[in-house]
Image (spheres, grey):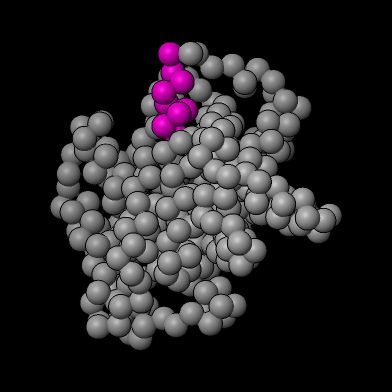
Protein backbone atom coordinates (compact mmCIF):
# COMPACT_ATOMS: atom_id res chain seq x y z
CA UNK A 1 0.00 0.00 0.00
CA UNK A 2 2.82 2.41 0.92
CA UNK A 3 4.58 1.64 -2.34
CA UNK A 4 1.40 2.41 -4.29
CA UNK A 5 1.00 5.72 -2.45
CA UNK A 6 4.58 6.71 -3.24
CA UNK A 7 4.00 5.90 -6.91
CA UNK A 8 0.89 8.08 -6.97
CA UNK A 9 2.69 10.95 -5.28
CA UNK A 10 5.74 10.68 -7.51
CA UNK A 11 4.55 9.86 -11.03
CA UNK A 12 7.54 11.58 -12.68
CA UNK A 13 8.69 8.34 -14.28
CA UNK A 14 5.29 7.76 -15.77
CA UNK A 15 5.15 11.36 -16.93
CA UNK A 16 8.47 11.00 -18.74
CA UNK A 17 7.18 7.86 -20.41
CA UNK A 18 3.93 9.63 -21.28
CA UNK A 19 5.88 12.38 -23.02
CA UNK A 20 7.67 9.69 -25.03
CA UNK A 21 4.32 8.14 -26.02
CA UNK A 22 2.99 11.46 -27.31
CA UNK A 23 6.23 12.20 -29.15
CA UNK A 24 5.99 8.75 -30.75
CA UNK A 25 2.38 9.41 -31.76
CA UNK A 26 3.30 12.70 -33.42
CA UNK A 27 6.26 11.08 -35.16
CA UNK A 28 4.07 8.30 -36.56
CA UNK A 29 1.51 10.81 -37.83
CA UNK A 30 4.36 12.70 -39.49
CA UNK A 31 5.26 9.55 -41.47
CA UNK A 32 1.87 9.34 -43.25
CA UNK A 33 3.29 10.98 -46.38
CA UNK A 34 5.59 8.02 -47.04
CA UNK A 35 2.59 5.70 -47.43
CA UNK A 36 0.54 8.22 -49.40
CA UNK A 37 3.31 8.76 -51.94
CA UNK A 38 3.73 5.01 -52.45
CA UNK A 39 0.02 4.44 -53.08
CA UNK A 40 -0.08 7.42 -55.43
CA UNK A 41 2.81 5.84 -57.35
CA UNK A 42 0.82 2.58 -57.56
CA UNK A 43 -2.06 4.40 -59.23
CA UNK A 44 -4.46 5.01 -56.34
CA UNK A 45 -6.04 8.43 -56.02
CA UNK A 46 -6.43 10.25 -52.71
CA UNK A 47 -9.84 8.81 -51.80
CA UNK A 48 -8.75 5.27 -52.67
CA UNK A 49 -5.73 5.71 -50.41
CA UNK A 50 -8.08 6.95 -47.69
CA UNK A 51 -10.13 3.76 -48.16
CA UNK A 52 -7.05 1.58 -47.63
CA UNK A 53 -6.25 3.40 -44.40
CA UNK A 54 -9.74 3.63 -42.94
CA UNK A 55 -11.19 0.23 -43.85
CA UNK A 56 -8.25 -1.72 -42.47
CA UNK A 57 -7.99 0.54 -39.40
CA UNK A 58 -11.73 0.09 -38.74
CA UNK A 59 -11.50 -3.70 -38.98
CA UNK A 60 -8.50 -3.82 -36.64
CA UNK A 61 -10.16 -1.50 -34.12
CA UNK A 62 -13.45 -3.44 -34.24
CA UNK A 63 -11.58 -6.65 -33.41
CA UNK A 64 -9.67 -4.93 -30.61
CA UNK A 65 -12.81 -3.49 -28.96
CA UNK A 66 -14.60 -6.83 -29.35
CA UNK A 67 -11.82 -8.47 -27.34
CA UNK A 68 -11.14 -5.59 -24.95
CA UNK A 69 -14.66 -4.45 -23.96
CA UNK A 70 -17.62 -5.40 -26.22
CA UNK A 71 -20.04 -3.10 -24.36
CA UNK A 72 -18.24 -0.13 -25.94
CA UNK A 73 -20.18 -0.94 -29.13
CA UNK A 74 -23.36 0.41 -27.54
CA UNK A 75 -24.54 3.87 -28.66
CA UNK A 76 -27.89 5.69 -28.72
CA UNK A 77 -29.53 6.08 -32.13
CA UNK A 78 -30.33 9.74 -31.48
CA UNK A 79 -26.58 10.45 -31.21
CA UNK A 80 -25.68 8.88 -34.56
CA UNK A 81 -25.29 12.36 -36.11
CA UNK A 82 -22.26 12.97 -33.91
CA UNK A 83 -20.46 9.88 -35.19
CA UNK A 84 -21.50 10.61 -38.77
CA UNK A 85 -19.92 14.03 -38.36
CA UNK A 86 -16.72 12.71 -36.80
CA UNK A 87 -16.47 9.79 -39.24
CA UNK A 88 -17.49 11.34 -42.56
CA UNK A 89 -16.38 14.94 -42.10
CA UNK A 90 -13.65 14.89 -39.46
CA UNK A 91 -11.85 11.75 -40.65
CA UNK A 92 -13.13 10.84 -44.13
CA UNK A 93 -13.04 14.30 -45.70
CA UNK A 94 -10.09 15.36 -43.53
CA UNK A 95 -7.95 12.46 -44.75
CA UNK A 96 -9.02 13.04 -48.35
CA UNK A 97 -8.10 16.73 -48.15
CA UNK A 98 -4.81 15.98 -46.40
CA UNK A 99 -3.76 13.28 -48.87
CA UNK A 100 -4.77 15.52 -51.79
CA UNK A 101 -2.68 18.33 -50.32
CA UNK A 102 0.30 15.98 -50.06
CA UNK A 103 -0.24 14.90 -53.67
CA UNK A 104 -0.51 18.48 -54.97
CA UNK A 105 2.13 20.16 -52.82
CA UNK A 106 4.86 19.00 -50.43
CA UNK A 107 4.77 17.07 -47.17
CA UNK A 108 5.88 20.11 -45.17
CA UNK A 109 3.28 22.44 -46.70
CA UNK A 110 0.50 19.87 -46.21
CA UNK A 111 1.50 19.28 -42.58
CA UNK A 112 1.75 22.98 -41.74
CA UNK A 113 -1.64 23.74 -43.32
CA UNK A 114 -3.08 20.84 -41.31
CA UNK A 115 -1.78 22.49 -38.15
CA UNK A 116 -3.99 25.53 -38.69
CA UNK A 117 -6.59 23.26 -37.03
CA UNK A 118 -6.12 24.74 -33.50
CA UNK A 119 -7.06 28.17 -34.87
CA UNK A 120 -10.26 26.70 -36.34
CA UNK A 121 -10.96 24.89 -33.07
CA UNK A 122 -10.79 28.28 -31.41
CA UNK A 123 -13.28 29.77 -33.87
CA UNK A 124 -15.68 26.82 -33.74
CA UNK A 125 -15.57 26.80 -29.94
CA UNK A 126 -16.45 30.48 -30.00
CA UNK A 127 -19.50 29.70 -32.16
CA UNK A 128 -20.74 26.43 -30.63
CA UNK A 129 -19.62 26.67 -27.01
CA UNK A 130 -19.57 30.46 -26.52
CA UNK A 131 -15.92 30.51 -25.49
CA UNK A 132 -14.47 34.00 -25.23
CA UNK A 133 -12.15 35.44 -27.85
CA UNK A 134 -9.04 36.67 -26.06
CA UNK A 135 -6.07 38.74 -27.20
CA UNK A 136 -3.87 35.64 -26.98
CA UNK A 137 -6.25 33.66 -29.19
CA UNK A 138 -6.35 36.46 -31.76
CA UNK A 139 -2.54 36.64 -31.82
CA UNK A 140 -2.35 32.86 -32.27
CA UNK A 141 -4.75 32.99 -35.21
CA UNK A 142 -2.76 35.74 -36.93
CA UNK A 143 0.50 33.84 -36.42
CA UNK A 144 -1.01 30.66 -37.90
CA UNK A 145 -2.24 32.45 -41.03
CA UNK A 146 1.05 34.32 -41.43
CA UNK A 147 3.03 31.11 -40.96
CA UNK A 148 1.01 29.32 -43.63
CA UNK A 149 1.57 32.22 -46.05
CA UNK A 150 5.33 31.99 -45.49
CA UNK A 151 5.52 28.22 -45.77
CA UNK A 152 3.52 28.06 -49.00
CA UNK A 153 5.55 30.86 -50.58
CA UNK A 154 2.79 33.47 -50.70
CA UNK A 155 5.16 35.58 -48.63
CA UNK A 156 8.75 35.38 -49.82
CA UNK A 157 8.10 35.12 -53.54
CA UNK A 158 8.74 31.37 -53.78
CA UNK A 159 5.30 29.82 -54.21
CA UNK A 160 5.59 26.09 -53.55
CA UNK A 161 1.93 25.14 -53.67
CA UNK A 162 -0.92 25.50 -56.15
CA UNK A 163 -4.22 27.09 -55.19
CA UNK A 164 -5.82 23.62 -55.18
CA UNK A 165 -3.09 22.26 -52.91
CA UNK A 166 -3.50 25.22 -50.56
CA UNK A 167 -7.31 24.84 -50.40
CA UNK A 168 -7.09 21.09 -49.79
CA UNK A 169 -4.53 21.73 -47.03
CA UNK A 170 -6.72 24.37 -45.43
CA UNK A 171 -9.70 22.02 -45.76
CA UNK A 172 -7.77 19.33 -43.90
CA UNK A 173 -7.20 21.78 -41.05
CA UNK A 174 -10.90 22.69 -40.87
CA UNK A 175 -12.09 19.07 -40.96
CA UNK A 176 -9.47 18.03 -38.42
CA UNK A 177 -10.60 20.84 -36.11
CA UNK A 178 -14.20 19.62 -36.34
CA UNK A 179 -13.12 16.31 -34.79
CA UNK A 180 -12.54 18.15 -31.51
CA UNK A 181 -16.03 19.65 -31.75
CA UNK A 182 -17.82 16.37 -32.52
CA UNK A 183 -15.77 14.53 -29.89
CA UNK A 184 -16.68 17.12 -27.29
CA UNK A 185 -20.38 16.64 -28.08
CA UNK A 186 -19.91 12.86 -27.69
CA UNK A 187 -17.93 13.12 -24.46
CA UNK A 188 -20.57 15.43 -23.00
CA UNK A 189 -23.10 12.67 -23.69
CA UNK A 190 -21.06 10.15 -21.69
CA UNK A 191 -19.36 8.16 -24.45
CA UNK A 192 -15.90 6.71 -23.82
CA UNK A 193 -12.96 7.59 -26.13
CA UNK A 194 -12.74 4.07 -27.60
CA UNK A 195 -16.44 4.18 -28.55
CA UNK A 196 -15.97 7.54 -30.25
CA UNK A 197 -12.89 6.31 -32.12
CA UNK A 198 -14.53 3.01 -33.09
CA UNK A 199 -17.61 4.57 -34.69
CA UNK A 200 -15.59 7.39 -36.20
CA UNK A 201 -13.36 4.90 -38.02
CA UNK A 202 -16.26 2.58 -38.86
CA UNK A 203 -18.47 5.26 -40.42
CA UNK A 204 -15.49 6.79 -42.17
CA UNK A 205 -14.73 3.38 -43.72
CA UNK A 206 -18.35 2.99 -44.86
CA UNK A 207 -18.23 6.49 -46.38
CA UNK A 208 -15.03 5.64 -48.27
CA UNK A 209 -16.51 2.42 -49.64
CA UNK A 210 -19.60 4.30 -50.85
CA UNK A 211 -17.73 7.01 -52.77
CA UNK A 212 -14.67 5.09 -53.99
CA UNK A 213 -14.08 2.67 -56.84
CA UNK A 214 -12.79 -0.12 -54.65
CA UNK A 215 -11.63 -2.46 -57.43
CA UNK A 216 -8.19 -0.84 -57.93
CA UNK A 217 -7.77 -0.78 -54.15
CA UNK A 218 -8.38 -4.52 -53.89
CA UNK A 219 -5.91 -5.13 -56.70
CA UNK A 220 -3.18 -3.07 -55.03
CA UNK A 221 -3.75 -4.26 -51.45
CA UNK A 222 -4.10 -7.96 -52.28
CA UNK A 223 -1.44 -8.13 -55.00
CA UNK A 224 0.73 -10.34 -52.78
CA UNK A 225 1.52 -11.02 -49.13
CA UNK A 226 3.90 -8.07 -48.99
CA UNK A 227 1.19 -5.69 -50.24
CA UNK A 228 -1.23 -6.93 -47.59
CA UNK A 229 1.39 -6.47 -44.90
CA UNK A 230 2.16 -2.95 -46.14
CA UNK A 231 -1.54 -2.02 -46.02
CA UNK A 232 -1.82 -3.30 -42.45
CA UNK A 233 1.34 -1.37 -41.56
CA UNK A 234 -0.20 1.75 -43.10
CA UNK A 235 -3.32 1.41 -40.93
CA UNK A 236 -1.30 0.66 -37.80
CA UNK A 237 1.27 3.43 -38.24
CA UNK A 238 -1.08 6.19 -39.42
CA UNK A 239 -4.22 5.35 -37.39
CA UNK A 240 -4.22 2.72 -34.67
CA UNK A 241 -0.82 3.10 -32.99
CA UNK A 242 -0.73 6.93 -32.90
CA UNK A 243 -4.16 7.08 -31.28
CA UNK A 244 -3.21 4.36 -28.78
CA UNK A 245 0.08 6.03 -27.82
CA UNK A 246 -1.54 9.45 -27.63
CA UNK A 247 -4.29 8.10 -25.37
CA UNK A 248 -1.71 6.43 -23.11
CA UNK A 249 0.13 9.73 -22.85
CA UNK A 250 -3.05 11.57 -21.89
CA UNK A 251 -3.41 9.33 -18.83
CA UNK A 252 -0.44 11.04 -17.18
CA UNK A 253 -0.11 14.52 -18.72
CA UNK A 254 -2.60 17.27 -19.50
CA UNK A 255 -4.19 17.40 -22.93
CA UNK A 256 -2.80 20.90 -23.50
CA UNK A 257 0.73 19.65 -22.83
CA UNK A 258 0.19 16.60 -25.04
CA UNK A 259 -1.05 18.69 -27.96
CA UNK A 260 2.03 20.91 -27.72
CA UNK A 261 4.32 17.87 -27.75
CA UNK A 262 2.41 16.42 -30.73
CA UNK A 263 3.41 19.40 -32.87
CA UNK A 264 6.47 17.30 -33.65
CA UNK A 265 4.32 15.97 -36.51
CA UNK A 266 4.82 18.82 -39.05
CA UNK A 267 8.51 18.92 -38.15
CA UNK A 268 8.82 15.18 -38.91
CA UNK A 269 6.83 15.61 -42.13
CA UNK A 270 9.10 18.46 -43.23
CA UNK A 271 12.24 16.43 -42.49
CA UNK A 272 10.88 13.39 -44.36
CA UNK A 273 9.88 15.56 -47.30
CA UNK A 274 13.37 17.06 -47.51
CA UNK A 275 15.42 13.92 -46.80
CA UNK A 276 13.38 11.15 -48.43
CA UNK A 277 11.73 13.00 -51.32
CA UNK A 278 14.17 15.88 -51.84
CA UNK A 279 11.48 18.52 -51.37
CA UNK A 280 12.92 22.04 -51.06
CA UNK A 281 12.13 24.25 -48.08
CA UNK A 282 12.22 27.99 -48.74
CA UNK A 283 14.99 29.80 -46.86
CA UNK A 284 14.41 31.60 -44.59
CA UNK A 285 10.65 32.08 -44.98
CA UNK A 286 9.74 28.39 -45.12
CA UNK A 287 11.45 27.61 -41.83
CA UNK A 288 10.13 30.81 -40.24
CA UNK A 289 6.61 29.89 -41.40
CA UNK A 290 6.82 26.45 -39.78
CA UNK A 291 8.07 28.10 -36.58
CA UNK A 292 5.21 30.62 -36.54
CA UNK A 293 2.56 27.93 -36.96
CA UNK A 294 4.08 25.89 -34.13
CA UNK A 295 4.26 29.00 -31.93
CA UNK A 296 0.58 29.71 -32.61
CA UNK A 297 -0.34 26.17 -31.55
CA UNK A 298 1.74 26.51 -28.37
CA UNK A 299 0.14 29.83 -27.48
CA UNK A 300 -3.38 28.48 -27.92
CA UNK A 301 -2.66 25.43 -25.82
CA UNK A 302 -0.85 27.32 -23.06
CA UNK A 303 -3.89 29.55 -22.75
CA UNK A 304 -6.16 26.52 -22.64
CA UNK A 305 -3.95 24.88 -20.03
CA UNK A 306 -4.11 27.97 -17.82
CA UNK A 307 -7.89 27.89 -17.87
CA UNK A 308 -7.94 24.30 -16.66
CA UNK A 309 -5.94 25.05 -13.53
The x and y percentages for residue 226 are 81, 59
Q: Is residue 82 magenta?
A: yes
- Find the magenta span and give its range: 78-86
Q: Quadrant of the C terminus?
A: top left
Residue placed farthest to the top in the image?
A: 77
The x and y percentages for residue 208 are 54, 40
Q: Residue at x 51, y 39 (%)?
A: 211
- Nearer to me, 28 or 279: 279
- Nearer to me, 304 or 26: 26
Q: Is residue 278 above or below residue 113?
A: below
Secondary structure that dominates the magenta span: helix
The x and y percentages for residue 276 are 59, 77
Report how many numbered discs are placed on residues in the image.
Answer: 0
Q: Quadrant of residue 84?
A: top left
The x and y percentages for residue 258 are 48, 50
Q: Is residue 27 above or below residue 188?
A: below
Q: Quadrant of residue 157?
A: bottom left
Amino acid sequence: MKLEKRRKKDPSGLKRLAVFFVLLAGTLWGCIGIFVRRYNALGLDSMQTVAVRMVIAAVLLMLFVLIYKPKLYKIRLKDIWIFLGSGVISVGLFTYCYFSSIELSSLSVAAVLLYTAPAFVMLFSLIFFKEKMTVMKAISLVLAVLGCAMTTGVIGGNLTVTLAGFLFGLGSGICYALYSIFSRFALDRGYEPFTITLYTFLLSAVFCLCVTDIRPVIGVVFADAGSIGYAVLFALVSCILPYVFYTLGLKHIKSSTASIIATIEPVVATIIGAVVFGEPVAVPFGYLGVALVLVSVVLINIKTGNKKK
